[in-house]
Image (spheres, coloured by chain):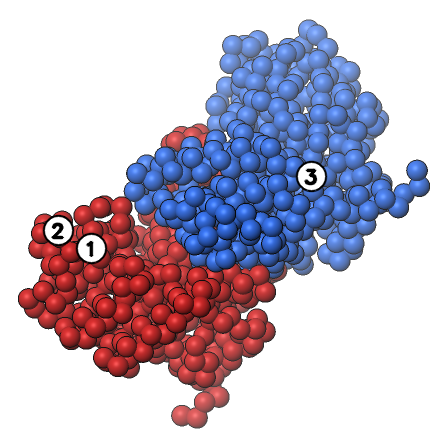
Chain colours: A blue, B red
Amino acid sequence: MRSDLDALFHPRSIAVVGASPDPEKMGHRYVRILKEFGFPGPIYPIHPKAPDILGLRAYPSLLDVPGTVDYVISCIPAPNILELVEECARKGVRLIHSYTARFRETGRHDAASLEQEFLRRARQAGIRILGPNCMGLYYPKMGISFKHNMAREPGTVGVLSQSGGNAVEMVFDGSLRGLRFSKVISYGNAVDLNEADFMEYFADDLETQVVCAYIEGVKEGRRFFRALKRAAQRKPVVVLKGGRTSAGRRAVASHTASLAGERELWRALVRQAGAVRVDTMEEMVDTAIAFAFCKPGTGLRVGVVGGGGGRSVASADECEEVGLWVVPIPDDMRRAWRELDPSVADWLGNPADGSILQGSPLTVERVLDMMADHPVFDILIANVGEHFPLEHPDGIPRTRATVQAFIQTAKRACKPLAVVLGDTLAHQPWQREVMRELREALASAGVATFPTVRRAGLALRRLATYYRERSEEHAYARP
Amino acid sequence: MRSDLDALFHPRSIAVVGASPDPEKMGHRYVRILKEFGFPGPIYPIHPKAPDILGLRAYPSLLDVPGTVDYVISCIPAPNILELVEECARKGVRLIHSYTARFRETGRHDAASLEQEFLRRARQAGIRILGPNCMGLYYPKMGISFKHNMAREPGTVGVLSQSGGNAVEMVFDGSLRGLRFSKVISYGNAVDLNEADFMEYFADDLETQVVCAYIEGVKEGRRFFRALKRAAQRKPVVVLKGGRTSAGRRAVASHTASLAGERELWRALVRQAGAVRVDTMEEMVDTAIAFAFCKPGTGLRVGVVGGGGGRSVASADECEEVGLWVVPIPDDMRRAWRELDPSVADWLGNPADGSILQGSPLTVERVLDMMADHPVFDILIANVGEHFPLEHPDGIPRTRATVQAFIQTAKRACKPLAVVLGDTLAHQPWQREVMRELREALASAGVATFPTVRRAGLALRRLATYYRERSEEHAYARP
């Protein structure tokens, strides 16, 4: 199986069947994207009449291509797919990525039969299928993508997603907060290669350090469970199940025509495998951010700094409600505070309310640093608290300095640290610009950012739980 | 009690004691804001030496002011507050808003005693206190504010918030999505006027149609419960309790020194009063948006349109998980679809997956319109699904048209409708600009927008539950 996926991910050449001169068609875009991303092998557009597409020589049929073709991207209508399989068989193609849709997911019997026949003939010819009804592969290191505006630099997060839209959302939203990806696989109806294949692959893939999976239905339950367990023992695996509710299962049927299993069964399966369950795409991105950027940690005792009084109360409540422990300030730290500023030392707590510290030598940044060094804190959350300083442009340098200090602490601290910075909704253009700049500074320094304390706390609790369970397993495992 | 609050909200003149020539000080800012917001009466800056502040004649003491003074904003240090009360008594002041902090919330015995003495002397003189330790009042219609960059136009949402920071967050975040406010009261330590007073006031206030309350602790339990119940019978009241957890209660102690009650007691109290409980500031803003902009409705059956397949599955799961019912498409609607486009009519469902409808005369906008007219749907959620069309600038007109169509349906539909539009995080400046423009178009048309389906669904479920409970109460009430 591994070798099939290697062929999938390292093709020597790619043909786009159904390539188009129309820039609005995906058959055009796949050619353009492969060119722009610098796919190193030959790219063959296949079009019945056009002599060239985007400056590349086009061929009327796959059989006219002079060299070998490993990988075919199909953008032709579904009724033509069987003919394409014949041509692929004769050409020695190893894998068809079928962007082509309107198979089983339409709910029509003839379309489902066609999908089965597609599979049968491909199997006969020894050709593997990615899809049908999917965006395919984003593998920046190999110059393969399904969107022109995804990052060119590779990263360490691997994604398997039955939905192309969710894969796009994951890459776009994650990359705005600094995530970069090893491979993202959108696999649609999964008539042949399925989630078990991809999970097995990611478990062994040295380029992938965190795995995110969006799954609507599982084809081979036992095999997938074994793969999930094995992957989760090696690296963090975050799983979002689509079709948890009866309405969700109906929606799955018309999307990728998968059989979406029972919610409770899924929860148990993910937990037993040692993977991390999330409930929304937002949580998926948040959790991937935590695993990709935060130092590992197993404890739940959180230290929180920054923001005003209301934010401090909210930080305390929300951290506790997601399962972290907001511990009181230890005596030795309070003694150190007394030396620095007796007027606030007995007043300040955890969370450390920034408004109390206005004008004090005991700054929010300094408190965070002390928490980073103190063993009573396992996890740190730092609020930028941008609402007040960014009321006037004069507050920009102060906010920049705060963010820089947080970055320094995050780099040297040996515990997970999350920075809370609001989203870029703001009234003034200069405020939006500063927020964007600050988020980019944090992202490019590899610091985990979250728009709210609740989301930061939830992601860090999941991180700590994952590492604790892993460490307990090792503690009791036979040597 | 009502008359005290009328004096508070309709002063004939305001003095800022501790006014400052330094633009960084709040004593400067309060003067500037009152000027800029056009407070109609005289504004008297009080400063020991400065002859004028911001072009207004300053007086060395309150007693030197020639006219009467109804309302005093105090920005002086806490130790000077008792002297100020004496002067206010002699001047006939009716209300002191004490921005001045560092009283009971410091945890120091002497500061708590000073706060009590402040109250005792004010009561003796018949002067009411707002605060201490609070931002005070934002009442745009009267030209009163505590931030220069809040909206000048009045609206219908009233806020009582023990935290100034949370009040600011509510106003800023809400107004970006179109909310406008009648009165926002930040009331801090609540040594005199407290949440019961403000809730009683909002219950009767004709300018306020939705009430939001952020409360850390209640001074007069029974009175507050009666006021909450009375207000909730008249208008939607949304309550966020700070200090729900033990860590949150510790944080409350150093913030407004309130006694934060038990979580379960609070939940029961809010439920019995018929008010709406939320758990974060984000949910508070979301719920206020739903009540301020959506038509009332009591049913839970939701129709969802737009976005791709993954988004449709997520919409279904998330709506069901927050307690809405994603009902199947009724037969008569499916028959109408067959006439418009037989190729998709049996495939499409609820949620109506936008990717199925590409190139079909049965557009997402049309499906939404049909759902608006069909009695099987009580509530509507429309995904703009901006990720795909806004990949290229060519997609701007299409996305604008979608949003305009959603606005038209929201205006004519007689049921709650929410639009889901992502936040302004986006890679390209033009994308951010379009998102901002679209959000503003929706906001200025009075359409409720949410960044995710889960948040939209939760807010609409709370809206429907509120109106259902109210209608059941009426159904069984004696005429």
- Tell me how far mark 2 sits from mark 3, CA to CA: 57 Å
**Residue wearing tag 2:** B50
Rendered view: B106 above or below A376:
below
The amino acid at mark 2 is: Ala
**Residue wearing tag 1:** B19
* Residue situated in front as seen by the camera: B403 or B263: B263
Split into 4 quadrants, where in the image is the C terminus of chain A?
A: top right
- Tell me the element at label 3: loop
**Residue wearing tag 3:** A296
The amino acid at mark 1 is: Ala
Comparing labels 2 and 3, the label whose residue is closer to the camera: 2
- Residue at image x 20%, y 68%? B71
Image location (x, y in percent) of residue A364: 47, 45
Comparing labels 1 and 3, the label whose residue is closer to the camera: 1
**Visible residue check, residue B407:** no
How would you rate the neighbour count of disc 2 (Cα within 10 Å): few for under 14, some for 14-19, many for 20 or more?
A: some
Q: Chain of mark 2?
A: B
Labels 1 & 3 near each other (Cβ < 8 A): no
When asked about the image quadrant of residue A154, the answer is top right
Q: Chain of mark 3?
A: A
Image location (x, y in percent) of residue A296: 69, 39
